[in-house]
Amino acid sequence: MNEKLKNLYKTIILKHNSTPIFFEKNENATHVLKAYNQICGDRFELYFEIKNGVIEDLSFHGFGCAISKASTSVLVKKLKGKELAEALLSCREFLKVTDVEVEIGENVEEEFEAFSAAKEFPGRLKCATLSWDEMIGFLEKRI
């Protein structure tokens, strides 16, 4: 793993783990997705509403390792306020970055690129993709 990637991984994961974006329950949300990793016990709920085809009031709550929590925080940051089709594209871009068989391009968002380091640790890959996988499943059924 190159030095730039190590620093990105460390900085972004630590930041989003210690101060996650919109880390709160929303009992009034019209949609709640449950992301659960049976292997390590990470468990998050994504709360949101869809109004006029746009993801609104997106937040999350739960517990897990630093990687899964930080990754879910990035998801919330990136998808809040996006149209469903655009959100699905963002989710797929994130999964490309974490795909062990895909070479990372030059124009990858820095916060996404940080999670490409999970490829170096196969046991942590599901932690990085947990909430993204759930959101993709939801969005594919809606579009």
Image (cartoon, rainbow, N blue to C red):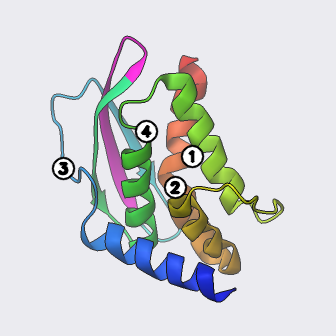
Q: Which of marks 2 and 4 is nearer the N terminus?
A: 4
Q: What residue type is labelled 1?
A: Asp
Residue tagged 4? 79
Q: Which of marks 4 and 1 is nearer the N terminus?
A: 4
Cα distance in 3D space between marks 4 and 1:
13 Å
Q: Label 4 neighbourhood size at 10 Å, few (<14), some (14-19), many (20+)?
A: many
Q: What residue type is labelled 3?
A: Glu
Q: In this view, does 112 lie above or below 60?
A: below
The secondary structure making up most of the magenta span is strand
Tell which of 128 and 20 is nearer to you.
20
Residue tagged 3? 24
Q: Where is residue 89 in the image (x, y as percent from the top left)?
A: 62, 35
Which residues fall within the magenta stretch? 42-54
* Residue 51 lies within the magenta run: yes
Q: What residue type is labelled 2?
A: Leu
Q: Label 2 neighbourhood size at 10 Å, few (<14), some (14-19), many (20+)?
A: many
Q: Where is residue 126 in the image (x, y as percent from the top left)?
A: 58, 63
Q: Label 1 neighbourhood size at 10 Å, few (<14), some (14-19), many (20+)?
A: some
Q: Which of marks 1 and 3 is nearer the N terminus?
A: 3
* Residue 32 lies within the magenta run: no
Residue tagged 2? 130
